[in-house]
Image (cartoon, coloured by chain):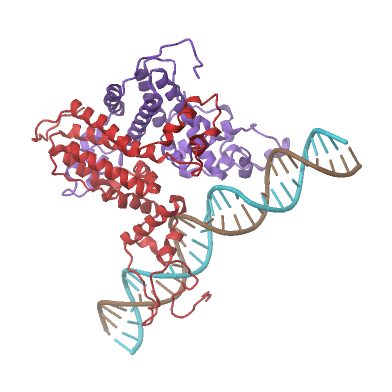
Chain colours: A red, B purple, C brown, D cyan
Amino acid sequence: MPHPPTEDARTPRDDNSESVDDPGDRDTTGPRPRTPITRGVLLHAALEIVDRHGVEHLSMRRLGQALDRDPMSLYRYAPNKAAVLDGLAEVVLDQLSIDTTDTDWVNQARSVAHQFRRLALVHPNVVPLLVTRPLATPLGLRPLGTLRPLESFLELLIRAGFDDADALHVYRSFFGFLYGHVLNELQELVDNPEETDDLLRLGLHRLPIREFPRLRALAPVLASYDGHAELESGLDILLTGLQTQLHPVHPIHDDTSPGGI
Amino acid sequence: MPHPPTEDARTPRDDNSESVDDPGDRDTTGPRPRTPITRGVLLHAALEIVDRHGVEHLSMRRLGQALDRDPMSLYRYAPNKAAVLDGLAEVVLDQLSIDTTDTDWVNQARSVAHQFRRLALVHPNVVPLLVTRPLATPLGLRPLGTLRPLESFLELLIRAGFDDADALHVYRSFFGFLYGHVLNELQELVDNPEETDDLLRLGLHRLPIREFPRLRALAPVLASYDGHAELESGLDILLTGLQTQLHPVHPIHDDTSPGGI
DNA sequence: ACTGTAGCCCTACGGTGTAGATATACAAGC
DNA sequence: GCTTGTATATCTACACCGTAGGGCTACAGT
């Protein structure tokens, strides 16, 4: 039987120079899992990899290595890699907290917006998963954690007096806008950070002058992007617009909604 | 207009596309390039693969097979696979047509919005690339075709009287909203199409009743989603809001002078 | 005729997700 | 005690991926 290295009592990790939070404590017996591992632990480790190195560097093998486990053993906690990606979106989205009892839904929406923006800035590499995974999975099959903000937000709106259809309307406009904003803000990549000239810093000098005069002229404005302010002004427009267009009646709801829109 | 999703008018040379290794067929004329191949041809073939089977099924090998070429030879027309993906976004985005001379910028924006929505519905599998690729590439390094709509839209706004900063403001709000809407609309996947009951069709029956009462109650409303109407009402809010918040000074209204640099 | 050069193709390397066989550990029954 | 069933952990293997590097062919210039 070919058994490569370290025959006896397991722990074949002497070649592992990575950070291990484990001093030599394996005296008692042989096989000993260091950390019990759960779906949460797995996802947390995956999140760390993605945060640090990007989605494309996340693989089951690397994840197993980070957890000091055989890659195959991970399939006990996630049916496949797609589920890990969905789980990442869940881990991040689940951090949104919505107070459904707040009667001022506009105020609460503002809070959610800023929380969401903050999460996106902390985990920029997860944002593609956030906006993209739902396109691959029908609503009913997504991790519950990703649906919970939806449910809470709907609850908030309905309690504030919207009927079902309008609540959905508002939800969609609002989160659509949020997704859009975040995607916009994260695009503001800098090509050459230590360059002082805005044009060079953004790499805009590469664009043909005659074809892209406007864009090139906007270099200084692009360079002074303020995501928070941009979000605020967008929220102003959207929320007041939603308020005037779909005025909620007072907090009494009638569940019998007719067909059609 | 590009081909609709399911319908497919076969081009004449398509009979060669399927993988059939016919041994006695090649000796007639020796080495023979079937089609000259260019970047455009390559991207078009890639788009077809993605439209039909999704992004994850696009590989250089499969692309080479579709073009009846050695996979390695493709690297002559694209430096790497990422460039192919960027190129796909370009091919689709380049189909947006913006009339920068239209003095009614709101009207023109509406047109762009509906064009964009249409493109997204025709090429749903490309949408993740559309919204995601820009996160990986600084502005100045993107394919020019993806920047051309940006430039045109800015041109439109500036001609309509916005100053640089406000034009960028409007552009961002507008396209952010558009991205958000499209992502929302494409999420409306159906789990079980032939089921008549809305709850089962959307797979919502899988959700715990006590945890997701609102969401489950919304099944009928979810099922009767009308993307066009939703987009329209969103545009109403956004565009009127933008108009009142950032009033352009006054339209320059010079349909004769095209340069203006 | 010879040589440079440019394009095309093949092979190979190191990676991927994961099916299936295999090894190991532990509970229950006799 | 022993056997046995079952759950878990690990290993091996397969089919695929992107693409570096080298070799091959064909033609241009001399």
Q: Where is residue D20 in the image (x, y as percent from the top left)?
A: 63, 51
Which quadrant of the view contains residue A165? Answer: top left
**Residue at x 39% of width, y 14% of height:** B103
Q: Where is residue B166 in the image (x, y as percent from the top left)?
A: 36, 26
**Residue at x 35% of width, y 37% of height:** A226
Between B6 and A225, the one nearer to me in the picture: A225
Q: Position of residue A183 (x, y in %)?
A: 38, 39
- B33 to the left or right of B247: right
- B44 to the left or right of A109: right
- How many numbered tags mark residues here? 0
- Reply above or below: A210 against B222: above
Direction top: furthest residue: B256
- Residue B188 visible in the shown view: no
- Reply above or below: A173 against A192: above
Between A159 and A243, the one nearer to me in the picture: A243
Which quadrant of the view contains residue B124? Answer: top left
Between B25 and A207, the one nearer to me in the picture: A207
Q: Where is residue A5 in the image (x, y as percent from the top left)?
A: 52, 75
- Reply above or below: A211 against B256: below
**Residue at x 44% of width, y 32% of height:** A220
- Residue B122 visible in the shown view: yes
